[in-house]
Amino acid sequence: MLNLRFSKFEFECGTDEAGRGCLAGPVTAAAVILTKDFNLELLNDSKKLSEKTREKLKPFIEELSLSFAVTHLGPNIIDEINILNASIRAMQESILKLKPTPNYIIVDGNRFKPVENIPHSTIIKGDSKFMSIAAASVLAKTYRDAYMNKIHEEFPMYNWKQNKGYPTKEHRAAIKKYGPCKYHRMTFKLLED
């Protein structure tokens, strides 16, 4: 069972990202502030949910949360500042879009940089412990998947609607055959040796 709160603060937000390990597309982060009586039975870490369940949960999370925001940071930024910094920046940007401004932040994982002067805690496997992080993980994943489906139309040969930019054998074979495109992360190892 996921916990609703980590801190005693009224506007606690959870944040998470999706797409860190991909070879193409953005890293996408979401931040969510839940209401005091938020309850969504199926909610869990997005990696443990089917695509269908994530899509089903998305409108409920959006409707039932006090506030949510999503940020995509593209390959050019990832290549410039590296994937860890881009992931953190995407989470920070999402948090700054929230209304009301959160007074506590819980972050999935073990790395984060402060946002303004808001206190925060990093929580390893936070998306399977706290509802707000799980909700953020579902939004980050569903918004990123939608983005990958959209750019798939432009470059169908990489089959992003299937692999979402992850380093599958098929994706790597397509990069080898067609070369990389503007959505690929050039600082990543696109081909195996």
Image (spheres, rainbow, N blue to C red):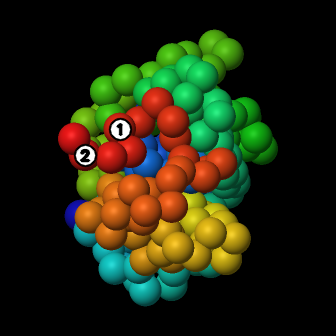
Is residue 110 found left or right of 106 in the rendered image? left
* Measured Cα–Cα span from mark 2 to mark 1: 7 Å
Local packing at callout 1 (Cα closer than 10 Å; few below 14, some 14-19, many 20+) is few
Vertical position of residue 61 compared to residue 116: above or below: below
Q: Which mark is residue 192?
A: 2
Q: Which mark is residue 189?
A: 1
128 and 92: which one is in front?
A: 92
| Element type at mark 2 | loop
**Residue 120, image x, y percentages:** 47, 24
Is residue 63 found left or right of 121 in the rendered image? right
The answer, for residue 173, to whether it is visible in the render is: yes
Q: Which mark is residue 100?
A: none
Q: Are marks 2 and 1 in contact (CB under 8 Å)?
A: yes
Is residue 163 found left or right of 34 in the rendered image? left
Is residue 188 found left or right of 182 in the rendered image? left
171 and 106: which one is in front?
A: 171
* Residue sitting at x 51%, y 17%: 113
Vertical position of residue 162 compared to residue 173: above or below: below
| Element type at mark 1 | loop
186 and 160: which one is in front?
A: 186
